[in-house]
Image (cartoon, rainbow, N blue to C red):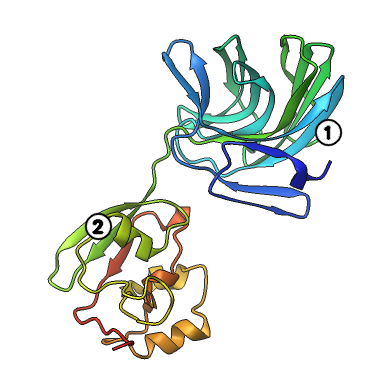
Amino acid sequence: MALQDYKWINEPEIWKIKDDTLLVETGKNTDFWAGTWYNFYRHSGHFYGRELKGDFTYQACIEAAFSEKYDQAGLMIYLDERNWLKAGIEFNDGQPAISSVLTKDNMSDWATGIFPGFPGKFWLRISKVGNVICVKYSCDKSSWYLLRLCQLPEAESCFVGPMCCTPERSGVKVNFTLHDGKRIEAEAKVGDTLLDVVVNNDLNIEGFGACEGTLTCSTCHVIFKPEDYARLPEEPCDEECDMLDLAYGLTDTSRLGCQITLTRDMDGLEVKVPETINDARS
Ligand code: FES
């Protein structure tokens, strides 16, 4: 079955399929957990599964950028909301742990241990024989180690596929400095544009974003520090350059905020808003 035919549980805002690889940017506060110890129930993690009947073996290579406590990526076998197993690497106590969570009748358990290899790339294999589940992991795709042997309830079919969650990860912070020196710290999501950040946080920047991102006004002119400007993932397109030429106070590190899409590594970005805003439509 092609990856395109899998089904999401909690589809993330940002994802795509490239060749036979699923690329996902996790949403904040996402997790799968039921009850035990923590006394909360979360069913907000991202799971992309295909339906399988009978016995099978499913294997995948997982590559992930872990940075926050409880960041996790791996595989999941899912019968229903109350019965599932997830396995993979979870970032815990400042180090990667290889772990599995078995949830039966809406109650989770968690087994975990130190991961011995490079956590940025590893392999997982889930085998199902009857209602017995065997999970193995590998650091190099050649030596495989048992991670979990357990049972799930009998079911006619189940879903299996990649899973990822970031329970503790918060959004991205952006610091705006206004022309009078006033600083405003704003909360944003990965995938927001700087115009989204201004609108969503109701920032009082007069005239900002008058054309609502249709590249016809240049009122969203912002200035970056040279080092931040150099790290922006995309060059301005011709239309943005044309509009920038009409902005007041243009600098070598100017961009239009509606064209800057936030990525995870832009957390803490410093953005200067120039004194005079020019609406190119007037
Ligand atoms: S909001 Fe008008 S050009 Fe960006």
Residue 55: horizontal and vertical position, in percent? 87, 20
Q: Which residue of the protein is positioned furthest toward the left in this rendering?
A: 180
Task: Examine the rendering and report whether any part of residue 224 can be seen.
Answer: yes
Residue 167: horizontal and vertical position, in percent? 46, 32
Whether residue 96 is situated above or below residue 267 in the rendered picture:
above
| Chain-order first, disc 2 or disc 1 | 1
Disc 1: which residue: 142
Q: Quadrant of the N terminus?
A: top right
Whether residue 100 is situated above or below residue 211 in the rendered picture:
above
Residue type for callout 1: Ser
Whether residue 170 is situated above or below residue 174 in the rendered picture:
above
Residue depicted at x 58% and y 18%: 112
**Disc sitting over residue 172 in the figure:** none
Residue depicted at x 53% and y 43%: 26
**Disc sitting over residue 202 in the figure:** 2
Which type of secondary structure does the marked residue at label 2 adopt? loop
